[in-house]
Amino acid sequence: MVIDQAHHQRYVLPATGEVKIGRGSDVDIVLNDNSVSRHHAIVRTSNASIVTIEDLGSANGTKVQGSTLRKNTHTRLHRYDLIEVGTVQIILQYVDSPARTCLFCPTGEFENRVSNACARANQDRSSLSLVAISGIPLGACASL
């Protein structure tokens, strides 16, 4: 889901495959933010239980849980990880069925993360966009 002043969208990952993220018109998830490169990152899923992300050599980098990813290196994602693509924030969520749309984090955790992200954006005097990507059944993620 992308949340900012003008957008609210939800993106579902395939059970297996890849999803390209960037500002270009030829990616799967288009983020219209100047901090995002045309071909910024790629998320890969494998057998609906392993999710990885790779920074594609972007100008402003990709972070997972505050740690900057090395360019062109795969990093495994875990449920509720906070991913920063440029200044756009993404939370990987898991759902137990495609029809369920509102599961982000255990009670209060999502709100705390959003509150912290808002405080950081205010401190940095930057804008805040929030993206949540879902698509992995909860049962498949018990070990993540």
Image (cartoon, rainbow, N blue to C red):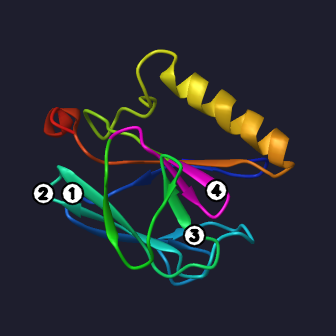
Q: Residues within 10 Å of mark 3 (few under 14, many from 20)?
A: many
Whole-angstrom CA distance, mark 1 to mark 2, is: 6 Å
**Residue annotated with mark 3:** 61
Is the C-beta separation of discs 3 and 2 under 8 Å? no
The three-letter amino acid code for the residue at tag 3 is Gly
Q: Position of residue 121 (x, y in %)?
A: 77, 44
Residue 117, position in %: x, y? 67, 38
Say the numbered circle drawn on residue 88.
Answer: 4
Against 60, is 3 above or below?
above
Label 4: few (<14), some (14–19) or many (≥20) C-alpha neighbours in 10 Å: many
Is label 4 or label 2 in front?
4
78 sits to left or right of 81 = left
Span highlighted in magenta in the image: 79-90
Residues at circles 1 and 2 in contact by the CB criterion of under 8 Å: yes
Report how far apart the C-alphas of labels 3 and 2 lie in the structure. Answer: 27 Å
As for residue 91 lying within the magenta part, the answer is no
Q: Which of marks 2 and 3 precedes in the sequence?
A: 2
**With respect to residue 113, does 68 lie above or below?**
below
Circle 3 — which element? loop
Q: Residue furthest top?
A: 107
Mark 1 or 2, nearer chain start: 1
| Amino acid on which disc 4 is placed | Val
Q: Which mark is residue 47?
A: 2
Neighbours of disc 2 within 10 Å: few (<14), some (14-19), many (20+): few
Which tag is nearer the camera, tag 1 or tag 2?
2
